[in-house]
Each structure stands twice: as structure tokens, then as C-alpha cells.
Image (cartoon, grey):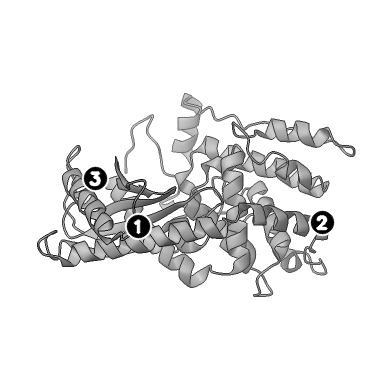
Amino acid sequence: MQFQRGRQLPCYRGNRPVPYVAHVTFDPIFCATVFPGADLPYENEELSKLLMDVHSRLTPSVDEQQAVATLVTKVLECLEAIALDRNKFSLGHIEEIRSIGSFKKGTMLAGHCLADIVVVLRGLPSFETTMMLGFLLRTEFLAKETGEIDEPPECLPRSYGFDFAYLGACVRVAFTTHSPEKPEPGIHISAPDQNVARAAILHARWVEEKASHTNVKALVRIVKDFKRRFLGFNHLSPWQIDLLAFYAVTQNPLNTPLPLSVAFRRLIQILAAGHFLPGSAGLLDPCEPSSRRVHVSLSLNQQDDLCRAAQTMCRILALEKFSVLFANMRPTTPITPAQLVEAANALPGVKIEFAEPVCMELSTSTAVVEQLEAV
């Protein structure tokens, strides 16, 4: 096998390729298997109380949940009626209608009255078809409303389909298909948007079957709040958060769900140890047949941002300066690790240091290429 200089070269030893071995990051819950006699992490009462208070603030009110649930029910009923009416929409054109997202999973945040639905079409979803379905949905919705309507519903076009908004609540309707045909740019919904919608159906089903424990849902809400408040965590996708929370709560030697405070600390610790860094075993995607690691979708800079943020938080948790992580619940811009360090050092006690970012410059020198060729 011949290679040209300057191209990426596989690592060979003799005539056999060197097998790729992913490293397993340090997990404090499995300490006893590595260090006999080590105790399992204990539940911190102060942190537990703080997390429960924060979770109660992140949980939507009864009115918010009722508003979204009512709108989702009506939208699903209208879409099913349209799918079965030959005169309104081609019979059989709609294969299935699925509720997905945080509302379906039970992890919706307070103030975010959003729900998600995926409509699977038999053929390629075009923008013309999706907007026609949006118009029919609005017409069917108004026909079913018996009371006086002060504010009519809005149907707003989006790259994935459309948003259906009514009385402060919103349902995002995405479209996909199982058809192998290739979408045309500008005419059909893009392949990436369709793939996201198709994967979301599998994710919602998996969470419903595997990750419905109360502590998992609570931890998902807390990490989703971190995603909107902290630089580094803002790179995480909802699916990555679901898998992290499920692992932190359920995967342990005792085979019983861990308390919320223990699982929260564990999640921060494994990220700080490099669980989502290059070469890590990380977490396998249970909905991907190719056993793909979920963190490979993050760029190297994003992985470093996440690890540095987790390392800073890990130091704060070790010093029990818990209030620093929840002092500013609505920042105007994402909070950086440097700002966390400054806030933590303003409190009495041991000071912590800022974790410098890793240099991401790639070497293109001849020496590197020659070294690869010699392997």
C-alpha cells in the first residue's frame, strides 16, 4: 500500500494495523473495583437541598404544563383528522405522527412552553407540502374551537417544517421520511433536518423505555439549565444530556438509582476527567447501529471548553462553594470558567486556579509526516 506525502496516514506496525483502544475515564463510583476498600461517594445534605430547590424553580408550573399539553393534544387530533380525510390531504401520504422532545420526555423547563412533533411522510417533504399542511392544521384547529378566540393561532415556516403557536404555547412540527430519494435544495427540507427529526423519534422512544426515573429527569433539567448558562455546557445536545444523566444515575455497581446530589457530582467529575475528550470511551449511542460515540459530534475546541468548565466546577464542588454554580440563574451571556473562578475566589476559603485552554494548533511539519511513515 502506497501513500503520498502530506496525506493522513494510518498507523501500521509491520503488516498489521495498530488497533484503536479507547481509554476509560476515571469514575469515582467504580473506585472500589480499582482501589479495594474505597467508600462510595456520600450524599451531601447541603448540596441535595440546593439541587432540589433549583429543580423546583426549573420545573414548569401546572398552568404551563397544562397549556402545552392541551395544545399538543389538539394539534395531534387535527393532524390525525387531516391524515384520514381524503379530501383534505392525500390519503396515506402521512405515515405516522410522533410526539418527541422535552415535553414528551418530561424534562421541559419553566418558561419554555414548547413541544415537538414529527410528521413522517411517505414521500420527500417539500416546503410547499409542509406549508399546505400547516394551513390545513390551522383551519382544522379553528373549526374545532367552540369558544370565542381572542388571539388566532399562528403558523410560522421553519427550515424543519413549521411552528404552531397559540396562547403563549408553541408546537414545533418537523418533517421527515423513510424514502431513500435525495432531497433537492430549496424545494425539500434538507437531509440534515430530516435526519434530526428521524433520530428524535428513536431518542424519545429510548428515553421513555430506559430513562424515565425521577432522578434522571431532574438531572436532565439541571444540566439543560447549565447548557443555557455556562460556556462549555452550551455545546451539549439534548441527546447527549439525556445519555449523561442516565449514565450518572443508573450505571453503578449497586444497580440502583443514585441520589440526585451524588449523580450530579458524578456527572461533573466524569466530564472533568475527560469523558468527552478525544480517545475516550465516552458513551455509545444506543440508537445507532454502528456503536457511534456521542461526543464525536463535538469539535476539539468544544470538547476542551466542556472539560475545562467541568474541571472548574469540580474544584468548586470539592470546596463546597455550591452557591457559586446557582447564584446567577439568568445571565445575559454564557458564564465562562474564568468568571466562575473569580466568583469562587471571592468567597472565603481555599482559592482555585483557572484551567488554561489546550493549544489546538495542528503541526504540518515534515518531521511529523516522516514519523508517521516510519511507524
Identify the amino acid type marked 1. Ile
Disc 3 element? loop
What residue did someone put label 2 on? Answer: 46
**Residue shown at 67% from the left, 51% from the top:** 268
Disc marking residue 117:
1
- The mark total stands at 3
Question: Is 374 drawn above or below residue 206 in the view shown?
Answer: above
What residue did someone put label 3 on? Answer: 189
Viewer-proximal residue among 161 and 198:
161
Q: Earlier in the sequence, mark 2 or mark 1?
A: 2
Q: Within 10 angstroms of label 2, few (less than 14), some, or many (20 or more) residues?
A: few
- Which picture quadrant has residue 285? bottom left
Disc 2 element? helix
Q: Within 10 angstroms of label 3, few (less than 14), some, or many (20 or more) residues?
A: many
Is disc 1 in contact with disc 3, using a CB cutoff of under 8 Å? no
* Place of residue 327 in the rendered image (x, y in percent of width and height, measured from the top left): 73, 41
Name the front one of labels 1 and 3. 1
Q: Within 10 angstroms of label 1, few (less than 14), some, or many (20 or more) residues?
A: many
Question: Is 225 drawn above or below residue 211 in the view shown?
Answer: above
**Residue shown at 68% from the left, 35% from the top:** 337
Residue 39 in sight here: yes
Q: Earlier in the sequence, mark 3 or mark 2?
A: 2
